[in-house]
Image (tube, rainbow, N blue to C red):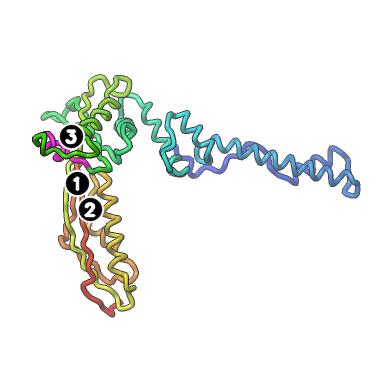
């Protein structure tokens, strides 16, 4: 259940005037009495104390929590804060960790377990193929997408290459590094307590789909001098967002909407088709932006 629409919880009364009124009534002190100022100060201190109690209670609720209490809440769910992770990002990730405790290895649990296996993993796509008769095959294919953009084809090429032709990264063969990551994910998702007993989990790298788009911009007469650079930056950011996710398509209409900034009159893409990615693919797209004309049309 979402708590977004719930009112802020109130754990203790925090009405300064009500506290002061009760204190004065109980003591019988009048405004002209010297003790009145002392009781006012006591009432204010009680009010501050009650505000601190309210804040302390709210800190135990994930929605209102902040460092360091937020980190204690994360620790209760076996979810540590990552390096340089903001409170907002950490807070959004903590509820996802509860998927790890779900029964029968649901899709979200497999994703969380795989993501936690290696810091280079940026996305995970579970897929359960069906038999010819459309019944579950009992096999779960898990595709892991890394910040190095490793692909199934890269691993196959490394395996096929002779010793002298293999890629070396920091003194180690790329094949060994890639296989070690797959093994770590497999080890994280195959224990009996985190998957159904009849599931067979197979871990793979995805495949890459590439496409290059020529982006022709017609600029307005009052467009800024760096319009081409601005549009190129937005196109590159969109390409990276898509590239970092599995099963994410490049959509022509969405690109046009993103690039239609102040100073742009018209955006034309070549090719004009969308580039689609399947569950086991990611799209690596390149955008070449050029201002090809200027118009005084509005």
Alpha carbon distance from label 3 to label 2 = 30 Å
Alpha carbon distance from label 1 to label 2 = 8 Å
Q: Residues within 10 Å of mark 1 (few under 14, many from 20)?
A: many
The residue nearer to you, when weighing 81 against 24, is 81
Q: Which residues are magenta?
A: 150-159
Q: Which tag is nearer the camera, tag 3 or tag 2?
A: 3
Alpha carbon distance from label 3 to label 1 = 25 Å
Q: Earlier in the sequence, mark 3 or mark 2?
A: 3
Q: Is residue 264 left or right of residue 284?
A: right
Q: Is residue 262 left or right of residue 94?
A: left
Q: Quadrant of residue 197?
A: top left
Q: Residue beneath label 3, please?
A: 175
The residue nearer to you, when weighing 281 against 179, is 179
Residue 296, x across and y down, in percent: 28, 80
Q: Is residue 156 magenta?
A: yes
Task: Give me the residue at 30% from left, 61% from top.
Answer: 233
Q: Which tag is nearer the camera, tag 3 or tag 1?
A: 3
Residue 263, x across and y down, in percent: 32, 72
Task: Give me the residue at 44% from left, 29% from top.
Answer: 77
Q: Residues within 10 Å of mark 2 (few under 14, many from 20)?
A: many
Q: Earlier in the sequence, mark 1 or mark 2?
A: 2
Q: Residue beneath label 1, please?
A: 277
Q: Could you tell me which quadrant the N terminus lies in?
A: top left
Q: Main secondary structure of the magenta part?
A: helix
Task: Give me the residue at 30% from left, 27% from top.
Answer: 188
Q: Quadrant of residue 115?
A: top left
Secondary structure of residue under mark 2: loop
Secondary structure of residue under mark 1: loop
Secondary structure of residue under mark 3: helix
Residue 250 badge: 2
Q: Earlier in the sequence, mark 3 or mark 1?
A: 3
């Amino acid at each position: 259940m979402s708590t977004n629409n719930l009112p802020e919880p109130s754990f203790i009364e925090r009405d300064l005037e009500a506290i002061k009124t009760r204190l004065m009534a109980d003591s019988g002190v009048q405004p002209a009495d010297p003790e009145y100022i002392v009781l006012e100060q006591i009432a204010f201190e009680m009010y501050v104390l009650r505000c601190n109690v309210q804040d302390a209670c709210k800190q135990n609720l994930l929605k209102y929590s902040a460092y360091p209490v937020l980190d204690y809440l994360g620790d209760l769910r076996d979810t540590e804060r990552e390096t340089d992770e903001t409170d907002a990002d950490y807070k959004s990730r903590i509820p996802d960790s509860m998927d790890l405790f779900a029964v029968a290895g649901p899709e979200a649990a497999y994703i969380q377990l795989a993501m936690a296996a290696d810091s280079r993993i940026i996305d995970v796509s579970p897929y359960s193929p069906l038999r010819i008769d459309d019944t579950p095959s009992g096999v779960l294919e898990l595709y892991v997408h890394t910040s190095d953009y490793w692909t199934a084809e890269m691993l196959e090429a490394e395996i096929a290459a002779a010793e002298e032709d293999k890629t070396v990264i920091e003194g180690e063969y790329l094949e060994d590094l890639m296989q070690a990551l797959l093994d770590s994910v497999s080890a994280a998702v195959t224990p009996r307590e985190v998957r159904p007993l009849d599931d067979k989990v197979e871990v793979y790298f995805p495949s890459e789909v590439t496409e290059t788009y020529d982006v022709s911009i017609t600029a307005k007469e009052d467009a800024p001098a760096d319009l081409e650079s601005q549009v190129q930056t937005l196109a590159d950011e969109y390409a990276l967002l898509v590239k970092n996710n599995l099963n994410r398509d490049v959509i022509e209409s969405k690109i046009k909407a993103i690039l239609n900034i102040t100073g742009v009159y018209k955006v034309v893409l070549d090719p004009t088709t969308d580039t689609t990615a399947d569950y086991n693919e990611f799209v690596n797209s390149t955008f070449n932006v050029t201002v090809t004309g200027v118009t005084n049309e509005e």
